[in-house]
Amino acid sequence: MSALKLLENRSWMDGSCAEDISEVDELLNINVLDEFKSYIQKSKRSVDNIINQFTLATEYRRQDYLAFLNGKSKVRNEIFERETYEIIKILNHLMDLNQNELVYSDQTTAAKLITRGLKLSRINKMGVMIIGYPGLGKSSTAKFEADNNEDMYISIDTTVKRITPLLKKLYRTFKGNYYAISNSAMLNEIAHYLKLYNKIIVCDQADYLTAEGIDILRTLAENANVGLCLLGLPNLHNKLNKDNPEVKQLLDKIRLSVELEPPTFNDLVLVLNKNWPGLSDEIKKEFFKYSRKTYRLLSHLIFHCRQELFNEENLGIELTVDHIRMAAGLLPKSKGQDEK
């Protein structure tokens, strides 16, 4: 499916991007002509190409859009403006998607497993550990579910090697700004918040946690009587088996351990249908082949293919196997994979 024809199938857009035809008041407060001009400026493409996009996606003619753009429309056509505004929103969303992010799908195997683990952690106030190799959807699913349930989500990195940076990261999730208070005061406020609102702690990239950091999370979960979910690479399990008192105490709280498998073809098809609808089976198989069974590399493939097809010279060109293979040449290599 070409970049232009993506507009002809607008049912794939999620609720945040689809326009509710009954919401007349919203449209009345929007200057669609200004939105149209703003999109033209943002897209940095010729007016002719942009008008072609709109005429392919609607039943209106080129003259209609030229008259609208030049302010020569004699009367306001609410249906025309609503249709135009809907397409502007979709095109803006497509441009945002070109920033290397996939539209999330909660129906993949990994998403269902992670969602179930977080739910059990909330209900039973227990520890959960979810491990898997990079690119299997751990972070995207955990953050999506944590945001929807207003859980305390943090992602650990190399800057969080001491107790104070970890407490500050946790503290900011519900306070916003950090105020100069002691570690013990932060610990008490965090535990009070978790207990008051019954929110679990979701710690992504837990591999970077030190033994002291592990002990802080365990203490918070116990004091607040809430669940704790750790997500990380497969070696996280080995790290938690170290001969360390703090780690051993955390192991007692973990009652569910899940190791994610690479996505199947059907899993990647679910994601492709959200991000590039209307693809043939042949194209889907090529995406699956060169994704190396990871959502992260699939994201790179889609990103590079879109960059190519959304070029001004290529609008209207159908996506082919060659586009995917060319994009695959731009992907980072897996460890140990030699060039062929």
Image: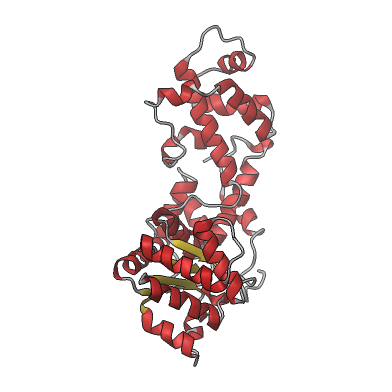
Task: Tell me what residue is drawn at x 49 percent, y 47 percent.
Answer: 275
Q: What percent of the width, then of the height, locates residue 12?
A: 43, 41
Above or below: residue 130 compared with residue 109: below
Above or below: residue 39 compared with residue 220: above
Above or below: residue 214 compared with residue 24: below
Q: Residue furthest left?
A: 124
> Which quadrant holds the C terminus?
bottom right
Foreground: 290 or 37? Answer: 37
Foreground: 9 or 136? Answer: 136
Q: What percent of the width, then of the height, locates residue 61?
A: 54, 17
In this rendering, would 143 be left or right of 112?
right
Q: What percent of the width, then of the height, locates residue 220?
A: 44, 73
Task: Tell me what residue is drawn at x 35 percent, y 72 percent.
Answer: 225
In this rendering, would 120 be left or right of 139?
left
Foreground: 159 or 231? Answer: 159
Task: Tell me what residue is drawn at x 44 percent, y 64 percent.
Answer: 263
Residue 314 image-quadrant placement = top right
Foreground: 147 or 8? Answer: 147
